[in-house]
Amino acid sequence: MLVVPSLFVYELMAVAERTLPPEHSDALWERFLTWRIPVVNVHDALMRDTLAIGRELGCSLYDAVAPALAQQLGVTLVSADRRAHGDWPGVRLVE
């Protein structure tokens, strides 16, 4: 099962807006809604872990939220960002 932080939604749609015609980014949003991917909003514990992990990994706050969420859920982090997440214990990097 895939679970994403709320930031993911903004990142996904920002890329769509930069790279797709408007009607395609609108369609992507509609498709995303059908996937029913759980989206976790920011909360105190998530932000505290995000800040600590960003310092530990030396990455941006934006890049630290995914491992923070994975840690809180006790699941494997899956990432395509080797630079930001390559040193995270047990990360599953995808190309």
Image (spheres, grey):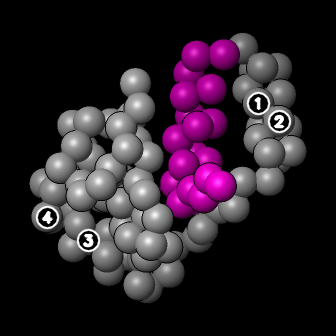
| Residue located beneath label 4 in the image | 56
Label 2, residues with CA under 10 Å away: few <14, some 14-19, many ≥20: few
| Residue located beneath label 2 in the image | 31
Q: Quadrant of the C terminus?
A: top left
Q: In the image, what residue type sits under mark 4?
A: Glu
In the image, which residues are magenta?
A: 1-20
Label 1, residues with CA under 10 Å away: few <14, some 14-19, many ≥20: some
Residue 28: mark in rendering: 1
x, y percentage for residue 24?
78, 20
Q: Secondary structure at mark 1?
A: helix
Q: In the image, what residue type sits under mark 3?
A: Leu
Q: In the image, what residue type sits under mark 2?
A: Arg
* Horizontal side of residue 89 vs 46, given as left or right: left
- Considering only vertical position in the picture, is 76 above or below 69? above
Residue in front for this viewpoint, 47 or 21 = 47
CB-based contact (under 8 Å), mark 3 and mark 2:
no
Distance from disc 2 to disc 4, alpha carbons, whole Å, reads 35 Å
CB-based contact (under 8 Å), mark 3 and mark 4:
no
x, y percentage for residue 55?
14, 64
Instruction: Locate residue 92: give its quadrant.
Output: top left
User: How many labels, in total?
Assistant: 4
Instruction: State whether the magenta stretch is mostly helix, strand or loop.
Output: helix
Name the residue located 76 percent from the left edge and 30 percent from the top edge.
28
* Horizontal side of residue 10 vs 49, given as left or right: right
Residue in front for this viewpoint, 77 or 43 = 77
Q: Secondary structure at mark 4?
A: helix
| Residue located beneath label 3 in the image | 51
